[in-house]
Image (cartoon, rainbow, N blue to C red):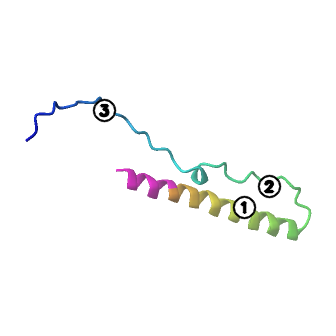
């Protein structure tokens, strides 16, 4: 043991933040008018892609949150 005095410091709280890629806004709604079957197919394709993007973000947040525990 040494005769050096013990130094006690105050605890420091470190707050983690969710990565920016996981909290960016989801894609906006498609508002183009539906005049043809092709328009409907395009809207469905866009909507499925937007849903997949949001789902990936939510899944990423869940995984990130589990690591923080």
Q: Nearer the viewer, residue 48 or 34?
A: 48
Magenta span contains residue 64: yes
Magenta span contains residue 13: no
Q: Which mark is residue 47?
A: 1
Going from the N terminus, do you reach mark 3 or mark 1 first?
Answer: 3
Mark 1 surroundings: few (<14), some (14-19) or many (≥20) residues within 10 A: some
Q: Report the mark closest to the observer, 3 or 1.
A: 3
65 shown above or below 40: above
Mark 2 vs mark 3, CA separation in Å: 49 Å
Please, which residue is most extreme toward the front here? 3
Could you tell me how many numbered marks the image carries? 3
Of helix, strand and loop, which one carries label 3?
loop
The residue sitting at 51% across, 58% down in the picture is 60
Q: Which residues are magenta?
A: 61-69
Q: Report the mark closest to the observer, 2 or 3.
A: 3
Query: Can you tell which quarter of the image residue 50 is in?
Result: bottom right
62 shown above or below 6: below
The residue sitting at 81% across, 67% down in the picture is 42
The residue sitting at 54% across, 51% down in the picture is 19
69 shown above or below 40: above
Q: What residue is disc 3 on?
A: 11
Mark 1 vs mark 2, CA separation in Å: 8 Å
Q: Are marks 1 and 2 in contact (CB under 8 Å)?
A: yes
Of helix, strand and loop, which one carries label 1?
helix
Find residue 47 and report its horizontal and vertical position in percent. 72, 61
Q: Are marks 3 and 1 in contact (CB under 8 Å)?
A: no
């Amino acid at each position: 043991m040494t005769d050096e005095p013990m130094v006690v410091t105050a605890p420091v709280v470190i707050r983690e933040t969710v990565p920016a890629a996981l909290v960016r806004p989801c894609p906006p709604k498609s508002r183009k008018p539906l005049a043809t079957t092709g328009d409907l197919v395009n809207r469905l394709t866009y909507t499925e892609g937007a849903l997949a993007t949001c789902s990936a973000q939510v899944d990423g947040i869940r995984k990130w949150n589990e690591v923080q525990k």
